[in-house]
Amino acid sequence: MRKASVALLARALAGAVPLPRSAVLLAGAALVSGSVLLAGPAHAQDMEFSLDEAEQQPQQEGSAEGADMSFEEGETQPTQESGSGDVIGDLATTETAAEQTETREAPTEQQEAREEIFAVQQVYALRINRVEITPTASFSLNDPFVQHTGVGVGLNYWWTNVLALGVNFIWYEGLENESDIGYFVRRATRLAVPVNSYQFGAHLAFTYVPIYGKFAMFNEFIFQYDIYVLGGVGLMNTRPIPVIDPEVRSFNFDIRVAFNVGIGLRVFVTRWLAIVAELRDYMYLEQLENLEVALGAERTNPDTWTQNSPAFINNVTAHLGLTIFLPFDFEYRLPR
């Protein structure tokens, strides 16, 4: 049909065959349509694809138009970023990433610590410029024949936090008693051991605190303590107890010079009240009863009732009591 149309159209154009105008138009239309139909399959048969072109994604609609767009020299062709197509979601993701980057880059603000921290704690109770009053009860430890029991009171002034000067007074008369062992020894062996009696003692002493700290009790209570040493000199009013010839002999109290040394432990209950325990040794020269009894008129002579030379006596005693510091409160004064 295509060939007949072409021949007819050629003859009409040459003027050999007269045709009506409508026939000419129909022949031209048939020719054009046939050319289009034949061009389509021919073009499809000539199309070839490479491996790279097959892997590329198909272009979206309007890409042909975008391909024909021309750009002037110096201009760059805009590229479309790959994404999910959700514009609002992409913007939110971008803002979140920017905030995280800013947070990482921003320096961490450091806050200044205003609380004062001390590596070594302050002393629980200051003693400097305070007066210490110490009531105590005492009893002897090393005399098996006489129990020297007494009550006393001490007064100390602390001119530093570890050094104090003080006095203590102890009353014994009426509180001490002779043990039964002396009585039974005399009856069984007819031998007597000379013993003595105290009336009171007054002593001057220096106190030094080399150790102080704290300890826990029952994993619940914490107590502050200090350990101190002391030493001094004083007076003791003593007399021998007549055991050799008690029917005739009697003795009066006399003053003796006595030295004392000791060690003590103080446990604080509060900053002004503490429990105290001390161990002291009082040393002096005592005039003991004479073991021999003179005959005749010399028996009643007081000069024969005591020994010719004094004996060295050391009376080790334990003291238990309380310590009260005045004034009750104090104030730390730290260097600036």
Image (cartoon, grey):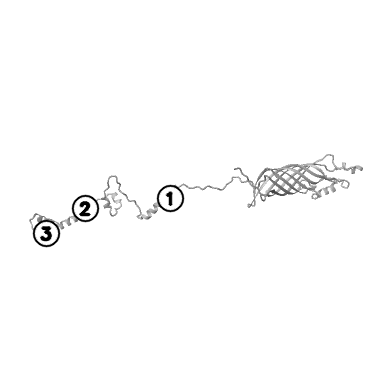
Question: As displayed, is residue 155 above or below residue 12?
Answer: above
Give 287 or 333, whichever is nearer the viewer. Answer: 333
Disc 3 marks a residue whose amino acid type is: Arg
Residue identifier under label 2: 43
* Disc with the residue nearer the chain's start (3 vs 1): 3
**Sequence-first disc among 3 and 2:** 3
Residue 26: assigned label = none
Q: Residue at x 11, y 59 (%)?
A: 21
Q: Position of residue 198 (x, y in %)?
A: 80, 46
| 56 lies left or right of 98 | left
Give the quadrant of the C terminus: top right
Which label belongs to residue 100? 1
Q: Quadrant of residue 254?
A: top right
Tell me which amino acid carries mark 2: His
The percent coordinates of residue 334 (x first, y second) are 61, 44
* Front residue of 147 and 271: 271
Mark 1 vs mark 2, CA separation in Å: 55 Å
Spot occupied by residue 107 in the image (x, y as percentages of width and height) = 46, 47
SS under mark 3? helix
Q: Residue furthest right?
A: 296
